[in-house]
Image (tube, rainbow, N blue to C red):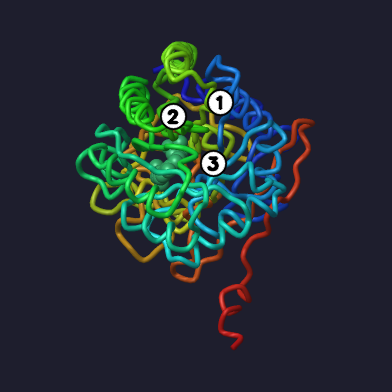
Amino acid sequence: MGSYMNNYFTVQTGFYGNTSPDRLLEQFGSPLYVYNENILRKRCREMANLVPYANFKANYSVKANSNLELLKIVRSEGLHADAMSPGEIFVLMKAGFKPEEIFYVSNNVSAGEMKFAIERGIITSIDSLSQLELYGRINPGGKVAVRFNPGVGAGHHEKVITGGKKTKFGVNLDLVDEVKRILKKYNLKLAGINQHIGSLFMEGDPYIEGLKSILSVAEKFDDIEFLDFGGGFGIPYRKQERQPRLDLDTLGKKLGDIISSWVKKYEKEVIIKIEPGRYIVAECGVLLGTVYAVKKNYGDTYVGTDLGFNTLMRPVMYDAHHEIEVYKNGKPVSTEVLEKVNIVGNICESGDIIAKERLLPKIEEGDIIGVMDAGAYGYSMASNYNNRLRPAEVLVRSNGEVSLIRRRDTLEDLVRNFDL
Ligand code: LLP
């Protein structure tokens, strides 16, 4: 398998800039989310330029990571954003996004939440006929988008497949006439149509299939302003095995061809949007933690760390795989001898395993563990379970310098809302 360390992602990318894992933990405490600005910017540019079509726009899907500093960088790269809640809209606006740069993809929301977007001039996508009725009642004559379910889905786990026959999302394609009836009833203008087939595909085919069925729906409406094909672009989590990247060149060209010929037929240069979340932020984030105990239970080795599932939920929730790097005295471990271990956290549940049965260099108390590709759905799904404090977040800037971009929770944060 070659030297484990030669494959270290953070070595290859100069991830830690002028600093190192041990110095970072000394300065900011453990556990800690570390982000790399160069990688973030690179991924933004790849998505911003994915489709060779003049009216193309990438909307960053803020649910993947809503750190204000990262959002400002994403915006500085020219991306717009999609939001899933008033909270996400609020945070996006704090980061400087203008209402016209935000698309609210709503799902089962109250009239109050719809009004939150309407009052701010933010276009909302509606996810069902009943919600379209509600929207019509509170904003007659307004502009709206409708999310359709293209009948195909994709994703790394059944919990994140959002298109196809077994999901709560979108309006079925055969309900176009009903949609038209409600639009007319409330004099609503259909500004856009959107979809999202699911999260994490490594082959573009289902995405293209979904796109084609949305295009055929769009033809049934006059004067559409935009089409949004959703996110789901995967990243290679299995970096040690050199998993290939999603082939963006091929996918982008295919999308460009389909869109260009459709636009000719439709006789309007509609705006084409995508909604990548994971692809933008996953690889720019590493979660660092500390090893406090190593033990054998009935033959299995458990490496006990402060990386409970309150810090990174994905392995427990989806059996997700994240590559692990091991550092001793701040340096990547270079031993060739590998040992099978389970890396576990400090939460009171047996399921609290961040990496199961992994072959890793020998790990001892005091070593530092780096969890790769933790930038997407890491901090954004972190919690205070067991009244643990969510980690701090730091950014390694393009010049190699590091700065704190969110402080660690404090004990006082745990009782803040009891101040009645
Ligand atoms: N647009 C909509 C409407 C979505 O629901 C999502 C993700 C996205 C865009 C962005 O998808 P992405 O490009 O990040 O795949 N927590 C899970 C992923 C949940 C995705 C939910 N929706 C995970 O950690 O894998």
Q: Secondary structure at mark 3?
A: loop
Residue 46 in sight? yes
Closer to the chain start, of discs 2 and 1, is 1
User: Badges 2 and 1: C-beta atoms under 8 Å apart?
Assistant: yes
Disc 2/disc 3 C-alpha distance (Å): 15 Å
Residue 367 in sight? no
Q: Quadrant of the N terminus?
A: top left
Write down the residue under mark 2.
233
Mark 3 nearby-residue class (10 Å; few <14, some 14–19, many ≥20): many
**Which residue type does callout 3 highlight?**
Gly
Mark 2 nearby-residue class (10 Å; few <14, some 14–19, many ≥20): many
Ligand 1 has an atom within 8 Å of the beta carbon of the residue at disc 2: yes
Residue 375: mark in rendering: 3
Decide which of 293, 40 is in the foreground and name it: 40
Mark 1 nearby-residue class (10 Å; few <14, some 14–19, many ≥20): many
Query: Residue at horizontal 28%, vertical 46%?
Result: 178
Query: Residue at horizontal 66%, vertical 43%?
Result: 70
User: Badges 2 and 3: C-beta atoms under 8 Å apart?
Assistant: no
